[in-house]
Image (cartoon, rainbow, N blue to C red):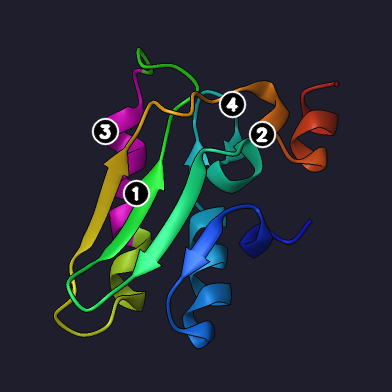
Amino acid sequence: MDADARFDYDGPADLRAPIAAALARVVDPELALDIVDIGLVYAVHVGADALTVRMTMTSAACPVTDLIVEEVEQALAPLAPPGTPVRVDMVWEPPWTPERLSERARRFMGG
């Protein structure tokens, strides 16, 4: 499955692939996999007021949450329309489950 098909997207069509590629470069240091393959990204919305990423972590106690949020913001800032902030909405519903892993991530983790 393509990276940009692993999460819902609402925004300009020409930004979909660059946003998906930027998110796929953000790596969870604990799992050594990108956040798209792990299934942490639920949705991206590019609107007039913000570029918003709705995502989760594998656990509410994840010690690298702040680092990943910062990296997502940095990765997407150059792609956001001028004057549009990047926001990360951390959500816990629906909870992350291993079923969200991509096939590549499953193979990497030996599953």
Locate residue 94 relative to residue 38 in the image: left or right.
left
Pointer 4 with pointer 1, Cβ within 8 A: no
Few, some or many C-alpha atoms within 10 Å of disc 4 (few <14, some 14-19, many ≥20)? few
Tag 4: residue type?
Leu
Image coordinates for residue 1, horizontal then vertical, percent: 79, 56
Task: Kindly report which numbered mark, 4 or 2, lies closer to the viewer in this rendering.
Answer: 2
Residue marked by disc 3: 66
Residue name at image x 48 percent, y 29 percent: 94
Few, some or many C-alpha atoms within 10 Å of disc 2 (few <14, some 14-19, many ≥20)? some
Residue marked by disc 1: 71
> What label does residue 102 carry, if any?
none
Q: Quadrant of the C terminus?
A: top right
Q: CA distance from mark 3 to mark 1?
A: 9 Å
Specify the segment rendered in magenta.
Answer: 63-74
Task: Kindly report which numbered mark, 2 or 3, lies closer to the viewer in this rendering.
Answer: 2
Residue 55 placement: quadrant? top left
Tag 3: residue type?
Asp
Residue name at image x 77 percent, y 23 percent: 109
User: Could you say whether the residue bearing mark 1 is in a helix, strand or loop?
Assistant: helix
Tag 2: residue type?
Arg
Residue marked by disc 4: 31
